[in-house]
Every structure is written in structure tokens, then in C-alpha cells.
Image (tube, rainbow, N blue to C red):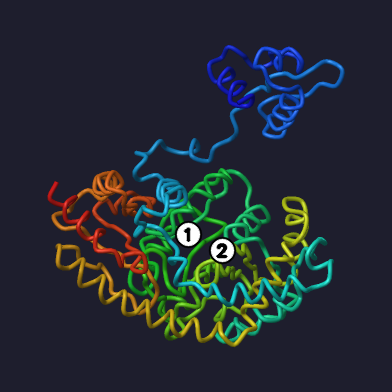
């Protein structure tokens, strides 16, 4: 009650920033509560940052400083096609909300029992595993495991060329901090994963796009963009592309690498969907030998989004700088997460989980494709693997309007222009087939198209 009273007074501006709060005894008397209750409420509000404690003076309302928002950088887009829109709606949605627009698997599709087993094992570990800081490079055993997994995709890398991160997003953030300055130019696919746009905005760089097709980026357009804009960095997926589900062809990969060498371009290859592949696609990092290609990945898609753990595989001379940046921004590795990931990946059940998962995704892909075609929504490309289906709506319907309509019905969708820097995907939509077992998704889509 005390906290609610103070919060409401601050919200109503009866207590403005800098104003002194009533004394502990005075507020206790006016609210008819104990002084200990007021002390506890004040301490909690201090912890929240709503008020400040000045020893010997009392408590004061904190100044409400508006933080930097990446959404404020760049053009003001309609909220339905903003890079943050799908993430916010999906992450904040309740369990009753359907999320065919999100970028992750349902919890029931993930290896929960393997995670519980690993947690039980770690609970018996020595105290340092549970409580101590981890090495900035990260758990050696997990780095060795990642090196072996990368070799399965013809990426030859030593464990001492790998640094663990808290996520794939942190991996890209650290690389941007190392290699970019505000005002530099970065090349992305069009369409591409929308959080690339959001993260690059936060780094205050210029973003340019290149059209991405069934075999990879349009090479002629790629060459023209490099010649005109001279980007320092190119961020892409080359395993299973997000959002299109496309697979990079060896011919396009070789041409991209030749152009990267010609124009001194560094490439960041996001390989987050590697575990979903039925047949390994060509990797830029494999052809390049991690010379000007940096590979990143994480375990949030096929294992667990709660166990935040990713990695960077790169040439050795860049690791010192990346390590310093990691220490500066997060100090040390999340060793408990790394131990959990290592334990699950080392368990024989994980490969069985992946086999089951790939089959389940293939069946869902077929079912969802048929269900969408029945209401006039056609895939722009039929993926070989993965969970995403990139589609065009019938009659060039406005995907943003469809997404707004669906949200009112409790369905979160991913409209095409969220992924498109050029805003040329207004009638496209990305669907996550793993999140579409509930037939209400198709009913809402059909209703939205009619409306």
C-alpha cells in the first residue's frame, strides 16, 4: 500500500522530481501503518530507482531521465512495420496469445528433460561452478565442443579461436563495437532478420540492403552496393536464411567472397539455425577459412532461450579486442549457462532430440503450407528445412494491416516490411510453422483477409 501510494503521487506529479518525501514517522502516522512498513517500502523504491536516499536528509523523488531508445534513431516508421514490433508483441504476450510471427519453437518442442537432468547434475558441482566468475573466453570444454560441431560444416577452427557470449545478439554487438564507428556503413540482406536493423540503429551506422533470393544475395546488386557505399561489414545468414528459408549456393558464396576481398569487406555469418538443417548448406566461413568471415551462433533456437549462450568464431588476432570489449560490457562469461549447455550437448539425448525435431518441423512445414494455400497465401520459396515460411498474401494485401487486425484477435504475426530495409515487402509475411498447430491461426488469417 505504501509503495502504491508513493508511485501514484509521483505519476500524478503531486510529488515532482527532486521533491522530498514525507518522513518515515510522518507517513506511517498518516497511512496508519508501522514505521518498519514504511522503511521497507522506501528501501524497495530506492532499489527500483524511483526515489533516492540521502543519509541524514531523507528520501527524495528521483529525476526521471529518458534513456536512449534505438527506436528513435532513423525514420519514424509505422509501428506495425517497426523492427521492435514483433519482438515486443511476442515477448510480452501471455500464454493464451498465438505467436506464428515469433522466431522460436514452442517450449514443448525443446529438450526439457535433458535440461532438468543437466540442472540436477550441476546442483552437485563444486561451489566455483555455481558462484564464481567465468573466464572471458568462456568454458574451455564448451569451446572444444563448438569447434567439433563447426567441423561438421567444414569450418575448421581451433577452440582458442572461439569466444563464448551471452547470446548471438551480444556476439554481433561486440563485433560491431570492435569494427565499426558511428557513421560507418553496414550491408544487410533485404529481407533480413529484423533485429539486425534494430541493433545497427543502436550503433548509429548507415544501413544499406541488397536483395536476397533463393540462392543468396543478388551478386550484381551486391557488387554495385560495395562499389557505391563501401560498407565495412556485411551481416547475413547462410545456413537457413531468416526470413526466407533460402540456402546459399556454392557459386554465389564464392562470388560474394571474391567481392569481399576486392572491397576489403568483413562478413558476419549468423549460423543460428544450423541444428535445423537436414543437409548442411555451404558456409562462407568454410570457404574463407575464417579470414574475413566471422561466424557466430547460439543455442537459443534448438535448445533453450533461457540458457543464454552464444559464440564467436574468428581469427586469433581479433580475439584480444573482443575479449576486452566483453570484459568492459559484461565483465566475464556466464559460466553456469555454459556448463548447462555443455552438459546438454554432451548428452546422447540431444542428437535424438534434433532428429525428432527435424522430422516434426518437416511435417509442420507441409501442414502449414497446405493450410495457408487453402486461404490463398502462397510461399515465395519452399524451404528445405527450418521453421520459417516466407509468403505473399493474396491480392497484394497489406501485411501490416493484417497483423494489426490479427493482434486484436490474440494472434501475433510478422509482416514483411519488418524484415525489409527498402520497405518493399508490404504484402509478404513470415510464418513460424512450429507455432501454427492451433487452427485459430488460419481462421484469424482468413477473417483478416476478408476484412
**Apparent side of residue 431 relative to residue 54 in the rendered image (left or right):** left
The residue that appears at 71% across and 81% down in the rendered structure is: 144
Real-space CA distance between mark 1 and mark 2, rounded to the nearest whole angstrom: 8 Å
Q: Position of residue 202 (x, y in %)?
A: 56, 44
- Give yes or no for contact between labels 1 and 2 (Cβ–Cβ under 8 Å): yes
Few, some or many C-alpha atoms within 10 Å of disc 2 (few <14, some 14-19, many ≥20)? many
Label 1 SS = helix
Pick the quarter of the image with the N terminus. Answer: top right
The residue indicated by pointer 1 is 226
Ranked by sequence position, the earlier of labels 1 and 2 is: 1
Few, some or many C-alpha atoms within 10 Å of disc 1 (few <14, some 14-19, many ≥20)? many
The residue indicated by pointer 2 is 265
Q: Position of residue 185 (x, y in %)?
A: 53, 51
Query: Which is nearer the eye, 159 or 12?
Result: 12
The disc label shown at residue 324, or none: none
Q: Position of residue 408 (x, y in %)?
A: 28, 43
Q: Is residue 382 above or below residue 102?
A: below
The residue that appears at 40% across and 74% down in the rendered structure is: 386
Amino acid at each position: 500500500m505504501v509503495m502504491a501510494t508513493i508511485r501514484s503521487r509521483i505519476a500524478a506529479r503531486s510529488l515532482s522530481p527532486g521533491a522530498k518525501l514525507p518522513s518515515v514517522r510522518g507517513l506511517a502516522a498518516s497511512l496508519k501503518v508501522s514505521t518498519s512498513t514504511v522503511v521497507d517500502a522506501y528501501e524497495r523504491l530506492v532499489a527500483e530507482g524511483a526515489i533516492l536516499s540521502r543519509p541524514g536528509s531523507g528520501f527524495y523523488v528521483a529525476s526521471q531521465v529518458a534513456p536512449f531508445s534505438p527506436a528513435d534513431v532513423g525514420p519514424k516508421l509505422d509501428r506495425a512495420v517497426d523492427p521492435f514490433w514483433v519482438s515486443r508483441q511476442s515477448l510480452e504476450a501471455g500464454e493464451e496469445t498465438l505467436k506464428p510471427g515469433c522466431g522460436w519453437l514452442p517450449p514443448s518442442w525443446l529438450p526439457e528433460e535433458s535440461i532438468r537432468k543437466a540442472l540436477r547434475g550441476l546442483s552437485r558441482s563444486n561451489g566455483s561452478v555455481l558462484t564464481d566468475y567465468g573466464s572471458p573466453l568462456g568454458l574451455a570444454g564448451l569451446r572444444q565442443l563448438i569447434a567439433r560441431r563447426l567441423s561438421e560444416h567444414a569450418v575448421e577452427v581451433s577452440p582458442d579461436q572461439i569466444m563464448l557470449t551471452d547470446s548471438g545478439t551480444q556476439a554481433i554487438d561486440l563485433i560491431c563495437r570492435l569494427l565499426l564507428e558511428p557513421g560507418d556503413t553496414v550491408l544487410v540482406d533485404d529481407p533480413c532478420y529484423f533485429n539486425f536493423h534494430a541493433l545497427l540503429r543502436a550503433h548509429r551506422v548507415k544501413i544499406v540492403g541488397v536483395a536476397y533470393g533463393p540462392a543468396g544475395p543478388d551478386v550484381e546488386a551486391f557488387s554495385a552496393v560495395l562499389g557505391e557505399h563501401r560498407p565495412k561489414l556485411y551481416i547475413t545468414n547462410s545456413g537457413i536464411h531468416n526470413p526466407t528459408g533460402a540456402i546459399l549456393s556454392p557459386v554465389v558464396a564464392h562470388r560474394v567472397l571474391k567481392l569481399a576481398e576486392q572491397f576489403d569487406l568483413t562478413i558476419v555469418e549468423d549460423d543460428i539455425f544450423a541444428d535445423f538443417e537436414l543437409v548442411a548448406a555451404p558456409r562462407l566461413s568454410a570457404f574463407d577459412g575464417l579470414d574475413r568471415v566471422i561466424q557466430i551462433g547460439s543455442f537459443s533456437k534448438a535448445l533453450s532461450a533461457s540458457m543464454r549462450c552464444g559464440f564467436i568464431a574468428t581469427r586469433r588476432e581479433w580475439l584480444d579486442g573482443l575479449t576486452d570489449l566483453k570484459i568492459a560490457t559484461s565483465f566475464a562469461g556466464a559460466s553456469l549457462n555454459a556448463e548447462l549447455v555443455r552438459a546438454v550437448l554432451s548428452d546422447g539425448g540431444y542428437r535424438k532430440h534434433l532428429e525428432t525435431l527435424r522430422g516434426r518441423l518437416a511435417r509442420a512445414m507441409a501442414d502449414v503450407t497446405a493450410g495457408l494455400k487453402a486461404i490463398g497465401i502462397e510461399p515465395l520459396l519452399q524451404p528445405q528445412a527450418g521453421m520459417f515460411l516466407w509468403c505473399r498474401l493474396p491480392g497484394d494485401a497489406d501485411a501490416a494491416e493484417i497483423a494489426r487486425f490479427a493482434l486484436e484477435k490474440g494472434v501475433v504475426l510478422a509482416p514483411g516490411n519488418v524484415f525489409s530495409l527498402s520497405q518493399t515487402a508490404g504484402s509478404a509475411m513470415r510464418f513460424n510453422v512450429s507455432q501454427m498447430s492451433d487452427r485459430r491461426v488460419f481462421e484469424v488469417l482468413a477473417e483478416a483477409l476478408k476484412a
